Image: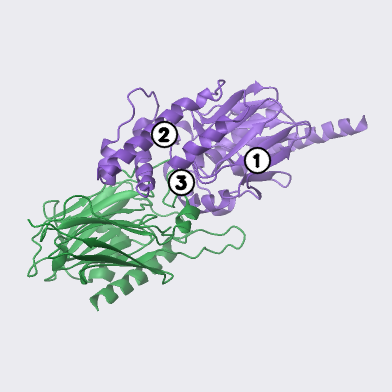
């Protein structure tokens, strides 16, 4: 009996200490992020379906956390250091258990620039084995965009790089609860990682699944379509996409994305075969009339660009 | 000889500018396309490439520069430079320079043409780091300099200049493809595409453990010959996208072999060729 009490007191003291620290960092004026418990011990913050912009504070990615009996795992940290602080505040309001793992699902700014808010000696950062190289190559562009567009200055030393690398699969034990992490071949990016909670059969697909938000190709189109076949085989009852609402019909929730990516592959191949140049293809490869994607203006032409540069090497 | 001088200048300038901008204090950001002459980087590039020679600003009717207003994907931005002047042995554009002011190494490419090129016309893909002026400068065989400038807005969001899958690009390193679409007609400028599988790595990535930068590795020169006569020579830089892609012209005056020789910054060399049988006009 004394042990739980002591632990509870310790947690209270730690909580009080952290509260002081975060208040000193000026977090108190911004509210904690809103969270929903989507399954027992599984929480999600829904980002808005928009581009990564100052007008939405960079709060566009879906974020999650899962509570075990010993500690908490956080899945992605948000698009700015400020979002990361509000995310941490939301988690600490929900549980007093320590955060033992922060899982970075891939090296895109809207998912990982909140990392700094979680840095500490007892928190391990986890990502695909290819994550660090990808983030290192992009870091100065992301920080530049933060400074230029968001007016937020972040130094190189404040960027947190994971130290626990996942190749294939890896299990994380949160105390009576195991998360299964899986690193995938190049798809949305070359460093995609999914998180599966066995107890509730919840899959955090991150940006391997887009809902409402048009899918964005920053890795390999054909690779992504192949990875989706393996994803469909996962025994999930609910799936949290990187952007857009949670899917409860699985694997049916993959279907709109599959249709878009297959049309992109088919039509870009046809443009290459017809001898079109990249800019001609970008101007002519249309989006399927039946699609209801958001942010099409922002990302479809970019997707054609990426698809063209990949598919022109076929045959 | 001329060619070697140009290359030396390219590298010297490139190195100096890389040092100046890498991991330094946040750079002054250009947000609008006003006053391209005032760009301080352009002033340096201009001095290193052209000294005090006069440069005439021209329109698309003389020197077309095709570039998107906004980069869709910062890693793959299609750019075309097309001289609209006569291309004869007596009078032609001998060189096209591509300068991207805001890139770490702004002098992105120098293309040299011969009368056998048929046209001074080149299409490629580049990385654009930031809001930037992009410049095409044509140098005629009698030494005139003509410039066309455009402003390209950086792509936002998660798009960044590095390659999407460096491991895959390295796995197929050096694979070359020459491709001609459409009919090949004797003595007519013929469009050819050269594809080079190469990561074209800027090397500007810091290793998190050693705090050292990874070595850069990029395609440095491309030389293309038709029937052993030069038709295109290119000095390139890591501003060119992963898997460098060039579209250019040559004039087949008889059946012959088109040959491309590619050398990268590690002195690795590759060669590709294509037999060409033009039909009579």
Q: A253 or A266, which lies in front? A: A266
Residue A81: percent from left, percent from top: 56, 41
Q: Is residue A117 above or below residue B63?
A: above
Query: Disc 2 is attached to a residue of which chain?
Result: A
Q: In this rendering, do the residues under marks 1 and 3 share a single chain?
A: yes
How many labels sit on residues? 3
* Residue occupied by mark 2: A261
Q: Determine crowd level at label 1: few under 14, some 14-19, many 20+ residues with C-alpha closer than 10 A.
A: many
- Give the residue drawn at x 11%, y 71%: B142
User: Judging from the image, what is the letter of the chain drawn in purple?
Assistant: A
Disc number lying in front (3 or 2):
2
Query: Disc 1 is attached to a residue of which chain?
Result: A
Q: Residue furthest top?
A: A249
Q: In this rendering, do the residues under marks 1 and 2 share a single chain?
A: yes
- Give the residue drawn at x 50%, y 54%: B167
Q: Is residue B219 above or below residue A13?
A: below
The alpha-carbon separation of the residues under discs 3 and 2 comes to 33 Å
Secondary structure of residue under mark 3: helix
Instruction: Report if the CB atoms under discs 1 and 2 are less than 8 Å apart.
Output: no
Residue B21: percent from left, percent from top: 43, 60
> With B86 as the anchor, is B71 left or right in this view?
right
Q: What color was chain B assigned in the picture?
A: green
* Residue occupied by mark 1: A102
């Amino acid at each position: 009996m004394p042990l739980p009490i002591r632990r509870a007191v310790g947690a209270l003291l730690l909580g009080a200490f952290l509260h002081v620290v975060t208040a000193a960092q000026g977090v108190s004026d911004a509210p904690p992020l809103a969270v929903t418990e989507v399954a027992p011990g599984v929480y999600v913050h829904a980002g808005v379906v928009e581009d990564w912009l100052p007008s939405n504070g960079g709060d566009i990615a879906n974020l999650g956390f899962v509570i075990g009996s010993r500690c908490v795992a956080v899945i992605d940290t948000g698009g700015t250091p400020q979002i990361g602080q509000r995310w941490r505040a939301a988690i600490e309001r929900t549980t007093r258990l320590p955060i033992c793992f922060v899982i970075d699902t891939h090296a895109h700014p809207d998912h990982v620039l909140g990392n700094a808010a979680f840095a500490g000696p007892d928190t391990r950062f986890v990502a695909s084995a290819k994550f660090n190289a990808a983030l290192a190559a992009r870091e100065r562009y992301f920080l530049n965009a933060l400074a230029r567009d968001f007016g937020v200055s972040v130094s190189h030393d404040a960027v947190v790089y994971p130290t626990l690398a996942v190749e294939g699969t890896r299990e994380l034990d949160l105390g009576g609860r195991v998360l299964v992490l899986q690193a995938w071949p190049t798809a949305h990016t070359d460093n995609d990682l999914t998180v599966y909670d066995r107890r509730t059969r919840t899959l955090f697909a991150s940006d391997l699944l887009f809902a409402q938000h048009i899918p964005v190709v920053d890795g390999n189109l054909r690779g992504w379509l192949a990875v989706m076949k393996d994803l469909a085989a996962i025994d999930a009852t609910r799936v949290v996409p990187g952007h857009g609402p949670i899917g409860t019909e699985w694997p049916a929730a993959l279907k709109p994305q599959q249709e878009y990516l297959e049309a992109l592959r088919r039509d870009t191949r046809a443009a290459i075969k017809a001898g079109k140049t990249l800019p001609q293809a970008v101007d002519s490869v249309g989006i399927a009339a039946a699609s209801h994607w958001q942010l099409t203006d922002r990302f479809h032409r970019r997707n054609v660009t990426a698809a063209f540069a990949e598919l022109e090497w076929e045959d | 000889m001329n060619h070697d001088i140009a290359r030396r200048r390219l590298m010297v300038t490139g190195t100096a500018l890389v040092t100046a901008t890498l991991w330094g204090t946040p750079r002054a950001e250009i947000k609008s396309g006003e006053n391209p002459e005032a760009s301080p980087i352009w002033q340096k590039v201009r001095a290193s490439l052209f000294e005090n020679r006069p440069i005439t600003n021209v329109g698309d009717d003389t020197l077309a520069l095709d570039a998107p207003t906004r980069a869709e994907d910062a890693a793959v931005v299609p750019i075309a430079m097309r001289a609209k002047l006569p291309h004869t042995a007596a009078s032609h554009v001998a060189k096209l320079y591509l300068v991207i002011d805001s890139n770490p190494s702004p002098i992105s490419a120098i293309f040299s043409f011969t009368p056998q090129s048929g046209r001074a016309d080149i299409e490629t893909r580049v990385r654009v780091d930031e809001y930037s002026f992009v410049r095409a400068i044509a140098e005629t065989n009698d030494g005139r300099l003509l410039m066309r400038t455009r402003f390209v807005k950086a792509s936002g969001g998660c798009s960044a200049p590095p390659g999407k899958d460096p491991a895959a690009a390295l796995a197929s390193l050096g694979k070359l493809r020459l491709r001609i679409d459409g009919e090949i007609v004797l003595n007519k400028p013929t469009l050819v595409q050269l594809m080079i599988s190469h990561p074209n790595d800027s090397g500007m990535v810091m290793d998190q453990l050693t705090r050292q930068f990874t070595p850069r590795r990029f395609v440095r020169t491309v030389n293309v010959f038709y029937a052993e006569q030069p038709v295109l020579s290119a000095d390139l830089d890591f501003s060119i996208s992963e898997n460098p892609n060039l579209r250019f012209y040559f004039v087949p005056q008889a059946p012959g072999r088109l040959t491309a020789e590619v050398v990268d910054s590690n002195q690795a060399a590759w060669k590709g060729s294509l037999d060409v049988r033009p039909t009579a006009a």
